[in-house]
Image: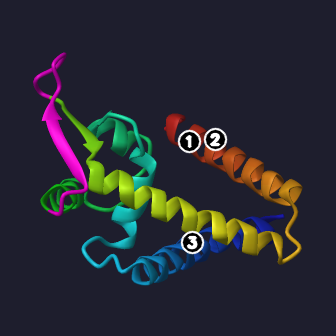
Amino acid sequence: MKDKYLCIMSSIERLHKLFLDVIKTELDRLGVYDINNVQALVLYHVGKAHLTVSELTNRGYYLGSNVSYNLKKMIERGYIEQTVSTHDHRASIVKLTAKGLDFIKKFDAALSRQVALLAGQEVTPSEVEQGSDLLRRVETFWSSLLIRR
């Protein structure tokens, strides 16, 4: 079981890198050169929500990248706007601009194409669901290990 456990964990790392490469290819196909693949994922996860910077970080949407740097770049390039929270002046709220919303529509279409192509590879919705369930349980397990410290 240990060998399979390590194999799954190595696969997660490789899959994440490959997915970022796929996103970069999609950005090129869409002619989007002013954000990177990690920033594209963040924009997608923000969607129509209004989130604090700490919510973005806590939800894991930054995947280990530098929150401040990426936010600054997405604000400068007109994808995100940042305002001070009316409830807590120490916190700032981020939301997508019209440009950001337009981008996530195009990006969502690209993800939908990928899902359709995956179905053509004889990957069933049930298998995708099982994989998702497994990864969620591993995430819960790892989180519990960190809490036990």
SS at badge 1: helix
Question: Can residue 134 be seen at all in this image of the molecule?
Answer: yes
Magenta region, residue range? 77-90
In percent of width and height, residue 50 lies at 33, 34
- Residue under pointer 3: 13
Label located before the other in sequence (3 or 2): 3
Picture quadrant of residue 16:
bottom right
Residue at the (64%, 63%) spot, across then down: 112
Q: Which amino acid does label 3 sit on?
A: Glu
Alpha-carbon span between mark 3 and mark 2? 17 Å
SS at badge 3: helix
Count residues near mark 1 (Cα–Cα under 10 Å), then give few for <14, some for 14-19, many for 20+.
few
SS at badge 2: helix
Residue in the foreground of this view, choosing between 17 and 116: 116
Residue at the (24%, 50%) spot, across then down: 80
Say whether marks 1 and 2 touch (CB < 8 Å): yes
Relative vertical location of residue 114 with respect to residue 59 in this rendering, above or below: below
In percent of width and height, residue 113 lies at 65, 70
Q: Which mark is residue 143?
A: 1
Relative vertical location of residue 89 with respect to residue 126 in this rendering, above or below: above
- Residue under pointer 2: 140
Q: Which amino acid does label 2 sit on?
A: Thr
Residue in the foreground of this view, choosing between 132 and 48: 48
